Amino acid sequence: MRLSCLFLVCTLLSSGALLLSGCLRDQCQSTLTYVRFDPIYAMPEDFRNTTVKAEAPRPLRKPGKIYFMGNYLLINERNEGIHVFDNSDPYRPIPVVFWKIPGNVDMAMRGHYLYADQYVDLLALDVSDVHQPKTICRRQDVFSLLGYRPGKGYFVGYQETQITETIDCENPNYGKEWYWCGDYSVAIKETSLPGAIGNGSLPTGIAGSFARFGQWGDYLYCVDNQRLHSFSTANPACPALLQSQHVGWNIETIFPWKNRLFIGSNNAVHIFQLSNPTLPTREATFSHTTGCDPVVCDEENAYVTLHAGTSCNGTLNQLDVLDIRYLPHVSLVRTYPMTKPLGLAVTPHLLFLCDDGLKIFDKTNPKELKLLNHVRDLDTYDVIALTPKHLLVIGREGFFQYDVSDPHHPRLMSCIRR
């Protein structure tokens, strides 16, 4: 930011005394570059009348969440749809098709049925022919992630525009990191921007740690900003909403583990018991300082990351290891300081963590995690341990697959660059 100030001092001699006239003032100008975020709205009749289409493969632009099913790799293109790759040969993933689903962020599969959010709705699609997806069921107004403005529709995101302008120090926005520039538009100084398994009769896939959809048996569980939604998939073609219950505020992720759901929010991990899967029951809550937090589990421990510098308003960057052997009692095993940890995955002996690249830990002793390797040349945010030897990694630069047979020396098998 370039800043120039001109100070003008006026003096006045009167009756032999030196008086300051009160005309001291400053004239400041600042050339400011910021990104303006203008709200985007969608009318429900518009997106509900739009057919999900299969289009030719396209490059990754804004990769989101990842999902693996059979030999297929699914990569979300944030708010646009899903890239489908044939990953039967992990050394040579082949782009197959792009499913255009405006407003899509999350996904899960059960057999040949795809469950995908579309803004506030839940869709069920028959994708037995990947080139001809068919929407066979829609549950409307399930999710409450987004606001609604009469006459404009649901708030579905922001249009980003970079702007450079000169303002003076009398402007009320002078020197601010962010400010509202209209009733619903927000401006953020450019240098402040952040870098942002089932057991049922039909097979299900594997999601990353940032997933908001999770499956257990004949049930699909979804979280939005405040609530946990439980669906029966006894009829997998059209999930039936059983009930929705309030969990807390700023809910972010869900991780089914055995007969429990581990739900991450920006200030706690909520654990729900599935002894009655139609009505998950809160069993325990472990509170922590504010910070975005995906969570994964193994037989004895839960691993939670907290990171700062986002809308979660957190200030700490750390990995928490929780002892979950004696639920409903949860205790903190140890906290490890990190750079900016994001997604994570576990195998029986290893922990894979997206933090300043990719970190691989020996977690045999959770009180003394041992760093085996740190791949630093990746900008990562989520990971799936497909097998103890096969790792899927997604980042802002694209998608990567690693052979981690030797965790001290992970070997890159293939990548899909954005």
Image: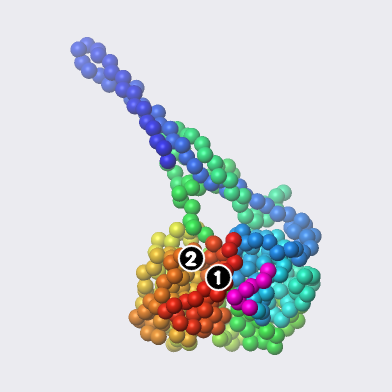
- Any magenta on residue 28? no
Q: Which residues are magenta?
A: 89-95
Report the residue marked by disc 2: 378
Considering the whole magenta stretch, tell me its main secondary structure. loop
348 to the left or right of 25: right
Relative image position of residue 1 (x, y in whole percent):
42, 41
Q: Amino acid at mark 2?
A: Leu
Residues under numbered marks 1 and 2 in contact, where contact means CB atoms less than 8 Å apart: yes
Residue 312 visible in the shown view: yes
280 to the left or right of 27: right
Q: Residue furthest left?
A: 16
- The residue closer to the viewer here, 189 or 283, is 189
- Residue 200: image quadrant is bottom right
Q: Earlier in the sequence, mark 1 or mark 2?
A: 2
Q: Check the picture and name the quadrant holding the C terminus.
A: bottom right
- The residue closer to the viewer here, 99 or 57, is 57
Q: Secondary structure at mark 1?
A: strand
Q: Amino acid at mark 1?
A: Phe
Residue 266 visible in the shown view: no
- Residue at x 58% of width, y 42% of height: 182
Q: Secondary structure at mark 2?
A: loop
- Residue at x 31% of width, y 22% of height: 9
Relative image position of residue 3 (x, y in whole percent):
40, 36
**Cα gap from disc 1 to disc 2, whole angstroms:** 9 Å
Relative image position of residue 316 (x, y in whole percent):
39, 64
**33 up-or-down from 227: above or below:** above
User: Which disc is residue 400 wearing?
Assistant: 1
- Residue 79: image quadrant is bottom right
